[in-house]
Image: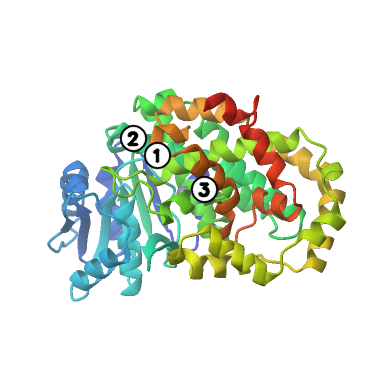
């Protein structure tokens, strides 16, 4: 049998030793556990909802493989579990004295909680994914809100991932849609990485790039099938999400799988937008909207003669000092975000001399940048149609966000991550205002949709 993409990717993974993806593979959970953790006891960690979905099948598989099991640790099903640090402490303290390896049964949040909790106990874990809902199954790090700031807390990836397509096909459709939203952002995120690569800010690792971008178009090709729970369509989506996780693991950073569309989502998340809804506004829904937003801006950019627009002397003259940048940031974000956002922004702030060099390089490299971007990107309308088909979010109206707040996100999202993206370049070049304005002016992408 030819080596699958996932098998090949596993060879570059630092933490993950085994991935079972396919129909009915939950029955292999026990064998995988016994092979990776011989003689160890397993403890299943789930919430009530996921326990109902797959708990008994996981128990049956562990039992069949002769794996001793501790009493499962089950979080309540309502209210929806939140990825807050307090839940990590709760789980960590609950299992600290139990000598067992965690098997997390989850579609997202609980996976992040378990991943970090076991790493604080210096233990490995494995996970059984119950929905094609996010790219975090095979990734290192846990996306957690701590001290009011959504951040990626470091922790190893799971030793093994089980992704049973029959279970995933039965997951609520909104979870599949949210996974689709998380995956589709890799299209414009690739554009952001191309810019960072060309400007010498963060080089592309071709092997890691291929892990994400190689299977991406296929994985996004059948949104209707994903919505209908068709295992073939879901197989592509799940594979794309797992490959993204493995890419982040290989690169030890989320850069391969996360760009400016994720910045949009992270900002709204940190401002608690939609978090008190039931169910809370999901990561992938926000990311999907961020994807369409960034793709629309890329289209405006690529329709322009950017080198002709950039007045380097004027941009350098207008460039704020760090003190001025700090004041701008404080005015743009709520106080609870200041400290963390300042640290992130400082990570990419450059002085006026460096700015001049960067803008000169931008002008020089623009033919290559724009040509690579054209190959990489898909039209905002195409991305929007895919997201609409799968049942994700493509317009701020759908989440009750007003036009001003949404529009402001184009300017504010870059504050909350060091990662360099399109809006950083446009801000540094002092051309972001007219380009974003164009999206909302008559004939612009958002003007037609508001
Ligand atoms: Zn994501």
Q: What residue does disc 2 label? A: 174
Residue count near mark 3 (Cα–Cα under 10 Å), binned few <14, some 14–19, many ≥20: many
Callout 2 secondary element: helix
101, 61: nearer the viewer: 101
Q: CA distance from mark 2 to mark 1?
A: 6 Å
Q: What residue does disc 3 label? A: 264
Callout 1 secondary element: helix
Q: Residue at x 35, y 24 (%)?
A: 228
Pick whichever of labels 3 and 1 is earlier in the sequence.
1
Q: Residue at x 45, y 47 (%)?
A: 242
Callout 3 secondary element: helix
Beta carbon at label 3 within 8 Å of ligand 1: no
Residue count near mark 1 (Cα–Cα under 10 Å), binned few <14, some 14–19, many ≥20: many
Q: Are marks 2 and 1 in contact (CB under 8 Å)?
A: yes
148, 285: nearer the viewer: 148
Q: CA distance from mark 3 to mark 1?
A: 15 Å
Please state if 370 lies on the left or on the right of 41 as rendered: right
Residue 416, placed above or below residue 26:
below
193, 168: nearer the viewer: 193
Please state if 436 lies on the left or on the right of 337 as rendered: right
């Amino acid at each position: 049998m030819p080596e699958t993409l996932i098998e090949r990717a596993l060879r570059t993974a630092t933490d993950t030793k085994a991935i079972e993806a396919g129909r009915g593979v939950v029955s292999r959970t026990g064998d995988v556990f016994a092979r990776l953790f011989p003689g160890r006891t397993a403890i299943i960690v789930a919430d009530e909802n996921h326990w109902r979905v797959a708990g008994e099948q996981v128990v049956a598989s562990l039992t069949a493989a002769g794996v001793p099991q501790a009493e499962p640790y089950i979080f309540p099903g309502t209210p929806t579990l939140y990825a807050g640090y307090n839940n990590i402490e709760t789980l960590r303290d609950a299992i600290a004295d139990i000598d067992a390896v965690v098997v997390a049964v989850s579609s997202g949040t609980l996976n992040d909680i378990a991943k970090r909790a076991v790493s604080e106990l210096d233990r490995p874990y494995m996970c059984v994914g119950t929905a094609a809902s996010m790219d975090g199954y095979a990734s290192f790090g846990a996306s957690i809100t701590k001290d009011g700031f959504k951040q990626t807390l470091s922790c190893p990836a799971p030793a093994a991932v089980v992704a049973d397509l029959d279970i995933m096909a039965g997951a609520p459709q909104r979870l599949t849609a949210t996974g689709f939203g998380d995956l589709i952002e890799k299209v414009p995120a690739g554009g952001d990485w191309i810019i960072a690569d060309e400007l010498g800010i963060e080089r592309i690792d071709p092997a890691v790039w291929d892990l994400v971008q190689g299977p991406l178009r296929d994985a996004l090709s059948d949104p209707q099938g994903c919505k209908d729970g068709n295992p073939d369509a879901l197989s592509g989506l799940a594979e794309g999400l797992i490959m993204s996780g493995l890419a982040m693991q290989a690169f030890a950073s989320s850069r391969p799988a996360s760009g400016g569309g994720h910045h949009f989502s992270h900002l709204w998340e940190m401002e608690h937008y939609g978090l008190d809804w039931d169910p809370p506004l999901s990561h992938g829904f926000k990311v999907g909207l961020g994807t369409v937003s960034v793709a629309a801006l890329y289209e405006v950019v690529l329709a322009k003669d950017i080198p002709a627009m950039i007045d380097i002397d004027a941009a350098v003259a207008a460039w704020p000092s760090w003190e001025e940048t700090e004041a701008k940031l404080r005015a743009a974000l709520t106080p609870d975000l200041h400290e963390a956002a300042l640290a992130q922004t400082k990570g990419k702030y450059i002085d006026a001399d460096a700015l001049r060099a960067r803008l000169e390089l931008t002008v020089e490299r623009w033919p290559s940048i724009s040509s690579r971007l054209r190959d990489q990107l898909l039209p905002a309308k195409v991305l929007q149609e895919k997201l609409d088909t799968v049942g994700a979010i493509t317009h701020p109206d759908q989440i009750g966000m007003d036009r001003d707040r949404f529009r402001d996100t184009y300017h504010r999202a870059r504050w909350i991550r060091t990662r360099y993206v399109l809006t950083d370049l446009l801000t540094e070049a002092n051309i972001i205002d007219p380009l974003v304005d164009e999206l909302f002016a008559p004939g612009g992408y958002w003007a037609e949709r508001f």
